């Protein structure tokens, strides 16, 4: 799958976002090395803190099917905004544990795209190692 196909799939997830409060739709597609992929969208709630972001939805779906960090090829996150959306702080913490440090993360809107990693997005990570 090429990068544009991955972005297109993530936009299909964004179209399924449930966003009655922000009306800001985000989509994610987590491509696995075996060719399978998992979509995720942001799902909001009247109790705002209960909202699940698109990238967490996709990663949790993959884990729910038994996939683990070594199985992932690329995570793609897209939005319809004027600017590319970088993952929020909670998502960065989740991705720091559930993705490999060097797994490519494609960020895109309709106009632009860039590639990063969780190592770049979240330096000085808090991990289970810190609790020993
Ligand atoms: N959101 C995501 O789904 N992913 C991000 O990376 C940034 C924020 C969602 C959460 C909420 O539904 C909406 O965008 C506005 O914050």
Image: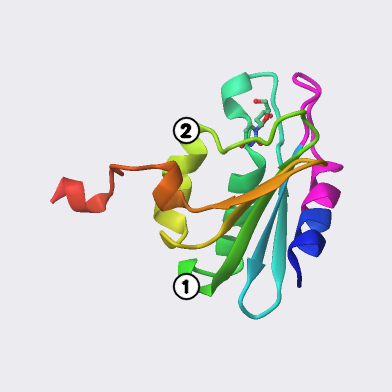
Q: Which residues are magenta?
A: 10-25
From what the image shows, is residue 79 above or below residue 6? above
The percent position of residue 14, horizontal first and vertical second, equals: 80, 43
Q: Earlier in the sequence, mark 2 or mark 1?
A: 1
The N terminus - image quarter: bottom right
Residue 129 is covered by the magenta coloring? no
Note whether 74 is above or below 132 in the view shown: below
Mark 2, residue position? 89
Q: Is residue 20 left or right of residue 44?
A: right
Q: Is residue 52 left or right of residue 19?
A: left
Query: For disc 2, does the CB lie below 8 Å from ligand 1?
Result: no
Query: What number is the disc on residue 8?
Result: none
Quadrant in the rendering for residue 43: top right
Label 1 SS: helix
Q: Is residue 13 visible?
A: yes
> Would residue 66 be seen by someone viewing this image from the given angle?
no
For label 2, the SS is helix
List x then y, in percent, for residue 97: 40, 53
Residues 14 and 21: in front is 14
Disc 1 under 8 Å from ligand 1? The reply is: no
Residue found 13% across the figure and 51% down from its top: 132
Residue at 70% of width from left, 61% of height from top?
A: 38
**Residue situated in front as seen by the camera: 41 or 103:** 103
Please state the horizontal and vertical placement of residue 32, each as a whole percent of the image.
Answer: 63, 71
Furthest residue toward bottom: 34
Identify the residue position indicated by label 1 in the image.
Answer: 70
Q: Are circles 2 and 1 on residues that touch, CB within 8 Å? A: no
């Amino acid at each position: 799958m090429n990068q544009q196909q991955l972005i297109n799939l993530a936009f299909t997830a964004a179209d399924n976002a449930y966003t009655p409060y922000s009306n800001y739709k985000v989509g994610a597609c987590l491509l696995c090395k075996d060719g399978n992929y998992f979509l995720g969208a942001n799902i909001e709630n009247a109790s705002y803190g209960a909202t699940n972001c698109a990238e967490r939805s996709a990663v949790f779906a993959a884990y729910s099917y038994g996939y683990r960090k070594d199985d992932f090829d690329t995570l793609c996150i897209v939005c319809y905004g004027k600017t590319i959306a970088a993952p929020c702080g909670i998502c960065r913490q989740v991705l720091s544990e559930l993705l490999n440090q060097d797994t490519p993360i494609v960020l895109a809107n309709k106009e632009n795209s860039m590639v990063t990693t969780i190592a770049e997005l979240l330096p000085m990570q808090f991990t289970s190692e810190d609790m020993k």
